[in-house]
Image (tube, rainbow, N blue to C red):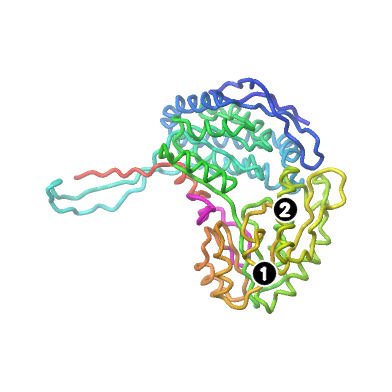
Amino acid sequence: MTEVEQHNLIGGEWVAAADGYEVVNPATEAPVGSAPNATPDDAAAACAAARAAQKAWAAVPMAERCALLAKVADAIDARRDELVEVTQAETGATMRVTKTMQVPQASARFRYYSRPVDPHVPLPPAVMPSTPLAPGGIVGGVQHRAPVGVVACLGAYNFPITNLAGKIAPALAMGNAVVVKPPVQDPLGTLLMARAFEEAGIPPGVVNVVASDSVDTAEAITTSPDVDMVSFTGSTAVGCRIAEVAGRQMKRLLLELGGKGAAIVFDDADVKTVIGNVSSTWTFHSGQICTSPTRLIVQKGLYDEVVAKLAGMAGHLKVGDPRERDTVLGPVISGAHRERVEGYVASALDEGATAVAGGDRPDLDVGYYVKPTLLADGHNDMKAAREEIFGPVIVAMAFEDEDEAIAIANDSPYGLYSYVFTGDSGRGMAVAERLESGTVGINTLQRNHEAAFGGFKYSGVGRDGGEWGLHAYSELQSITWSG
């Protein structure tokens, strides 16, 4: 395994941490390596370094900033094999997911935001009458996207380097400096990726990376007076805490939080399409995806068939060593998280659900594995149907008509991503527009990466993705003139 030094990147220097903490491979329960354990003082120094570097970085023409982002992408690609090894080990992702989604998507995001855009959007001239405020005339105007300042980027453990790349790249493109806090469970890939910023020639202090397993260190970043914006992906509980402490200083927030994806299946849906998409809750990173269709809401005429075919599929999915080519489900991130997932399954069974697939542990000696689980006879009052499980568990429930399906789907504190499966595209669009969800997929889980991404309700605040990412990490300034 590649050695990652016990240092944090602060102000362009790799600063030794006073101590470290162990990072564990969830598939083997063996150590992957030791991460630096930054203190609140380290965090404060990183934030101060970002503040000191930000104005000069913002003064660099955008085309030049973006050219450096392209070099970052190249540097990540050059470290691909090393990053695959480290990231696979610390996340427990299958090799297929690691090689297609974890590592290459990180460089792809830097390359996407390496295309400069004009931060000025002209406004049509307005003819204004004379008022006590000012004489009349033709008033021109432009909308200018200005940097926010210093952005704290806090990432999620399911796709640590990809998720953080999607924050760092647009923030840098718009002239911000960043302080990066990798997820506690798997920080080593991010620390390795940070070498790419040096190799690409990003100026010292523009990117700072501090790893820690301490809540105090994380809060030292989010509450720092040197931080103007917090971008966080993770649990709703942590997001609410960030909103609480950051709100006292009126910091900008971009929060992509939990999800409880509703998949509405009408009687005229193509069953093969439904099974292929909904089963991604099992087949894609063991259900540790906030957009997973974990609530399966099926019209009664198709309910039995869909449940039976999904249950049959679950029995053929290999659970085990994520490095083996035929493995479909690797482990969840930790032993504590496995117990949490199992607790949700147990509560659903107590509340009347039936485990038609899974519901127990696979027969494996080591690793934090969970069988693909399908809970039939569900209802929306179950804890497992209301709270985000973040594991390979689907709760199936039946409905009579369209209004009931929409009511079930919307009866949730979350609203990140929902789905509609129907043979009637017109009905699919009409139902999608009635769902309280930031994104709705009709007959597909495929993403459009130019679409704005974010959630309703407790699924978050703000939008990024595509060019929306540039908007997310900038302030909108209106400039007007008379002439």
Q: Is residue 448 magenta?
A: yes
Which disc number belongs to residue 397? Answer: 1
Locate residue 257, reporting x and y percent: 56, 49
What's the CA distance linking mark 1 and mark 2? 20 Å
Amino acid type, callout 2: Gly
SS type, badge 2 = helix
Instruction: Say whether residue 454 is left or right of residue 188.
Output: left
Instruction: Say whether residue 34 is left or right of residue 235.
Output: right
Q: Residue at x 82, y 40 (%)?
A: 28
Which disc number belongs to residue 182? Answer: none
User: Residue at label 2?
Assistant: 343
Query: Which residues fall within the magenta stretch?
Result: 441-463
Amino acid type, callout 1: Met
The quadrant of the image that shows the N terminus is top right
Q: Nearer the viewer, mark 1 or mark 2?
A: 2
Q: Nearer the viewer, residue 123 or 192?
A: 192
Decide: marks 1, 2 in contact (CB < 8 A)? no
Q: Is residue 482 above or below residue 392?
A: above
Locate residue 138, reporting x and y percent: 19, 50
Q: Is residue 124 above or below residue 63?
A: below
